[in-house]
Amino acid sequence: MDGHIVALPTETVYGLGADATNKEAVANVFKAKNRPSFDPLIVHVPTLKAVQEVAVLSKRAEQLFLAFSPGPLTVVLPKRKCIPDLVTSGHSTVAVRIPAHPIMLQVLQASGLYIAAPSANPFGFTSPTTAQHVLDQLGTAISGVVDGGPCTVGIESTIVDMSTDVPKVLRLGGMALEQLEQILGPVETQLSSSNPNAPGMLSSHYNPGATIELYPDREALVAAVSSNNDAIGVLYWGEPLPIANSFNLSPKCVDTEAASNLFMGLRELGKSKVTKIYAHLFPEKGLGRAINDRLQRAANK
Ligand code: TXA
Ligand code: MG
């Protein structure tokens, strides 16, 4: 592939793909994103058989793949030699995922490649959920983007570390914790930015270009909007509010719908040149946890 990198659609967010075994291409991914080399990439594969080619699969991890893949789940496992250290930032583990997008699966199957792909955004910014988002932010730095339409899940995959005896959730994402726990039982979460196992989980991320204030309570949010004359954007859910520069994530408060609209909403409000965004946190269950995690990181400076 001559070291070329191409943005590809997945069901979660668009990825910036490189042949995982081509060090030049992988280096170009880090460069195009301005991503620090200590932040490892996820390797995308089409089948459970291919998971076993890149990683050492335990029985429990296999159960997870059988239950939830293809889908928005990434599993961290001991890596095999075919994956260069550059991809895993020198870690002895590799993060592997079987994505559920038909185009991405076709590319993986037809090329026979393992594709290393981080989200296709500059480091520290919001992940892209349409091909246009990719072009807006990385257009000049990449060889192209395959347009697979808007991403249906809309937030990144859930990452579970299965490389030790104790499973740990390293990132909340498109697969709800409740679903994982049906297979694993109660599972620990270790989401802090100081976690050396997921160095990319920085506490400040998803920068929309405006300050964000978080409100657990709708009434408090509405009161704050009415008492403020600044250029404010509002990200919320539930009954529509008659407020300019507002974006409703899900009028019926459905977590999957809100997740699929979240990054679009942050981008739209960011574009409207508001200086502050007031965001209504989602109920803390299902994908609400991952939505609130992204809002928290977007709010952190
Ligand atoms: O949904 C997704 O996961 C998207 C699509 C494109 O697949 N990809 C994505 O990649 O979100 P990225 O690079 O934006 O986030 C990958 C995360 C980072 O936080 C990184 O630190 C963590 O995965 N990660 C990668 N390899 C790891 C490893 N060996 N151990 C622990 N964490 C790892
Ligand atoms: Mg990312």
Image: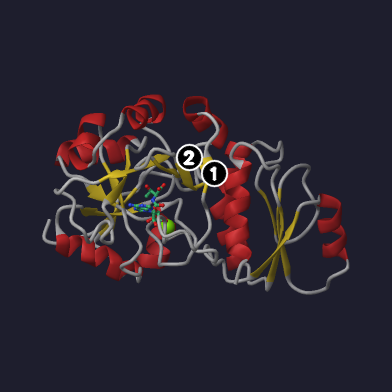
Residue under the point 35% across and 46% down: 9
Residue under the point 29% across and 49% down: 93
Locate the N terminus by quadrant. Answer: bottom left
Q: Is residue 29 above or below residue 181?
A: below
Mark 2, Cα crowd under 10 Å, few <14 / some 14-19 / many 20+, is some
Distance Cα–Cα, label 1 vs label 2? 6 Å
Residue under the point 14% across and 57% down: 22
**Are circles 1 and 2 on residues that touch, CB within 8 Å?**
yes
**Residue 279 appears in the rendering:** yes
Q: Is residue 33 above or below residue 176?
A: below
Q: Is mark 2 within 8 Å of ligand 1?
A: no
Q: Secondary structure at mark 2?
A: loop
Q: Secondary structure at mark 1?
A: helix
x and y percentages locating residue 104 in the rendered image: 29, 41
Residue under the point 46% across and 58% down: 195
x and y percentages locating residue 231 in the rendered image: 74, 72
Horizontal side, residue 172 vs residue 61: left or right: right
Locate the C terminus by quadrant. Answer: bottom right
Horizontal side, residue 119 vs residue 176: left or right: left
Q: Amino acid at mark 2?
A: Thr
x and y percentages locating residue 299 in the rendered image: 63, 65
Per the image, the residue denoted by label 2 is 152
Horizontal side, residue 298 vs residue 232: left or right: left
Question: In this orientation, which residue lies closer to the viewer: 219 or 199?
Answer: 199
Question: In this orientation, which residue lies closer to the viewer: 299 or 262?
Answer: 299
**Residue 141 appears in the rendering:** no
Q: Amino acid at mark 1?
A: Ser
- Label number found at residue 260: 1
Q: Is residue 282 above or below residue 34?
A: above
